[in-house]
Image: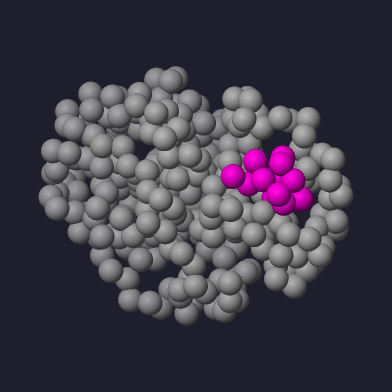
Amino acid sequence: MKRRSLIAGLATLPIMAHAQSRDPQRLRVALLPDENASTIIQNAQPLRAHLERALSRQVEIVVTTDYSSMIEAMRFGRIEVAYFGPFSYVLAKSRAPGIEPFAVGVERGSPTYQSVMIAQASGQVRELADIRGRPFGFGDQASTSSHLVPRATILQRAGLIGGRDYRVVHLGTHDAVARAVQGGQVPAGALSKPILDTLVRRGTIDATRIIEIGLSEPIPNYPMVLQGNLSDALKAAIRSAFLDLRDAEVLRSFRVEGFASTNDEAYNVLRETARLLELDLSQMRG
């Protein structure tokens, strides 16, 4: 990926999102494709039922093929509500300025989470310095905790530059990174710590076959975002459906204990992190 000014990418003329109706009777709710799509849809059925009860309308759960297609779906009004990763939200906002973040997941009393860097327990990478000269596994290019943050705030600060000091390997999803490290396809990689914890709890990843070699500072958690041109009454109902959510089964599918209010300014730290990498947004699959 070329390293240029973030400002150049932001200068691209944005296209406003257009919903078919300000008060649609069918809401399309997109969930971030950070794991296997069928697993996400299955786990989201309690969410769909909750939203249909709370909003008195049909709800369709959508899982796009990747972060890029989710951003474009929001940009062109093909979805009304979306659960973005922090940086994929920043990318979406740069293309569709009218979208509005309104809720953020709370874990352990905090609206933040962390990125974790792992290595194969039986491999040769035992610390950050051992990554030099080897491949390193990231998720999607637009992923906050499986690309942007570990690359900028952990590896780059340790003097390790992608493409120069190690080979960048994008594997798509968080669970794909964890599996690739565990299986030795890549010696090390980065992903969301809450997702890794979930994979270990499910038995998908064997905790004895990986080791932790790095942990990021707290990152603003995933925001829930809606189209700004929905009716005021519908937006208020959607906000309440998440901010007042107490159903443990639904919250478990988000890996959070609840939702709190948020706004666009909370994600400025991700914009600054992108500047550290001098990212050219036009080169990203967002």
Q: What residue appears at the point 43 percent right and 20 percent down from the top-left corner?
A: 249
Find residue 91 and report its image quarter: bottom left
Residue 196 appears in the picture as rendered: yes
Q: What residue appears at the point 30 percent right and 60 percent down from the top-left corner?
A: 75
Percent x, y for residue 86?
49, 51
Magenta range: 176-189
Vertical placement of 89 versus 279: above or below? above
> Closer to the camera, 66 or 280?
66
Looking at the figure, which quarter contains the C terminus?
A: bottom left
Percent x, y for residue 38?
41, 35
> Closer to the camera, 51 or 2?
2
> Is residue 59 within the magenta segment?
no
Vertical placement of 135 versus 223: above or below? below
11 to the left or right of 214: left
Residue 263 appears in the picture as rendered: no
232 to the left or right of 87: left
Q: What residue appears at the point 17 percent right and 28 percent down from the top-left corner?
A: 56
Looking at the figure, which quarter contains the N terminus?
A: bottom right
Percent x, y for residue 276?
63, 69
Percent x, y for residue 134?
78, 61
